[in-house]
Image (spheres, coloured by chain):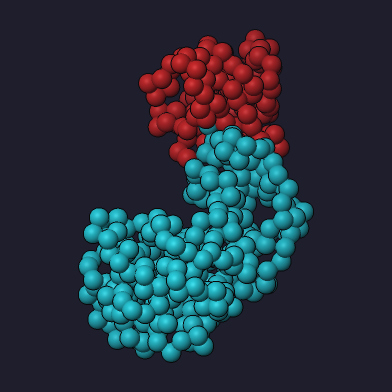
Amino acid sequence: MKALILTGGKSSRMGSDKASLKIGGLTQLDRILSIIQPLTPEIYLSVAQHDREARDHPTLPDLEENPGPLGGLQAAFAHDPDCHWLIIACDLPLIQQSDLQRLLDHHDSSKDATCFLNPLDQHPEPLCALYSPSASPKLHSLIEKNQRCARRFLASLQRTDLTPSHSNSLLNLNRPEHLAELQHLHQHGTVEKEITVEYFAKLSQEAATDSEILRTSAATLAGLWEELRLKHHFSLDLPHIKPAIDNEFADWTSPLSNLQTIAFMPPFAGG
Amino acid sequence: MFSIQSSPLDLSTLRQQMADPACGALVIFEGLVRNHHQGRDVEKLHYTHHPVLAQKEGERIIAETLAKFPMVQARAIHRIGTLEIGDCAVVTLTSSAHREAAFEANRFLIDSIKAQVPIWKQESYTNGEIEWTSPCPNCGPVPH
């Protein structure tokens, strides 16, 4: 088994290179390296096609320009089509070594892939998964058809689906507000709380309720929103929503406490 | 003063409440339910709000208006519930010694209410469809 870390490019929503973002003094890349190193000595970094920057680990450049999220796996199978590849994005700050160990332990080499179902929306997660050589020709034929959706690719494979250790293990680092969530989790650990959430207007329609009481281990408003956005498939995302805590408008980075009432409000339309 | 009510607005009473012998100008803006929105035929509107935050935010905006325009009196009322075409959904009243300050304050007041008070409207169209309205550029507030 070999591992490929997707170092990503510039993130438009984060406004910076995710691999070098630090939480608890460690960059995302260094953290992922530290949990993979005990599992395999053969670690590669996925980089852009013309990236010639010197790194501490061997690199696998994309085979073309901007190939999308499947470009890393494509380059990996081109490098060694007969090997099982552990593919992991470097923007999964809560993934644990024990999660990756479970991918290895449950891997059935007669199937194409072993992966996690994201507990927040029950979708198989393609960028933290172990792919068998049998996935290689399937990827090849997909790319020939110019289809590049990683989730759809994984959904089409013969899989072993696992549940990760925590509900937020697969949380992505997609927005600056999520960095605050992750820093908070790093500093204070995961604390479960009971929260009342109120939805207004379009959100109450999409959630099919005005309010709900739930248990969450989210640390900040942004973390809770991400959890609920996936749960209810909201059509709006964080920049368009105004949150409030106990009837006061609040910042997305505000920490949550037990028994708070949180309101999520879509753009106002009075008058 | 800011208030939210489900019953129809009584403009003549509101007008009397603004009476002040020192004021030579009273500006009243009425926001009315119109029969079209972004090219679609509207039959009626249903307004909802966040009860605590809408009241709090409305009062804050009135205080902000009075602070910004010290010689002005200001008051605003927003309706919630189901409104028919032609109904008055919101009214802002500003009075001052002279018209310039009253006009400016009124504009500030209604623009702030539309942008900052957590009130939403659901539009029922004549073809039977129902949708939560997203504010269009002509309707004012930039989505937050």
Establish if A235 lies above or below A187. Answer: above
Name the spot of residue A151 as percent of width and height, x first.
42, 58
Which residue, as the protein is rendered here, is positioned at the far right?
Answer: A259
Quarter of the view holding residue A201: top right
- Which x, y percent locates residue A84? 40, 77
Q: Which chain is the one coloured cyan? A: A
Which residue is depicted at the point 53% across and 44% down?
A234
Q: In this rendering, is residue A111 above or below A52? A: above
Chain identity for the colour red used in the image: B
Query: Which residue lies most toward the front here?
Result: A110
The residue located at (22%, 75%) in the rendering is A50
Q: Quadrant of the C terminus of chain A?
A: top right
Identify the residue at image location x=29%, y=59%.
A142
Q: Position of residue A36 (x, y in %)?
A: 49, 82
- Find residue B23 and report its image quarter: top right
Q: A179 or A235, which lies in front?
A: A235
Relative image position of residue B138 (x, y in whole percent): 40, 28
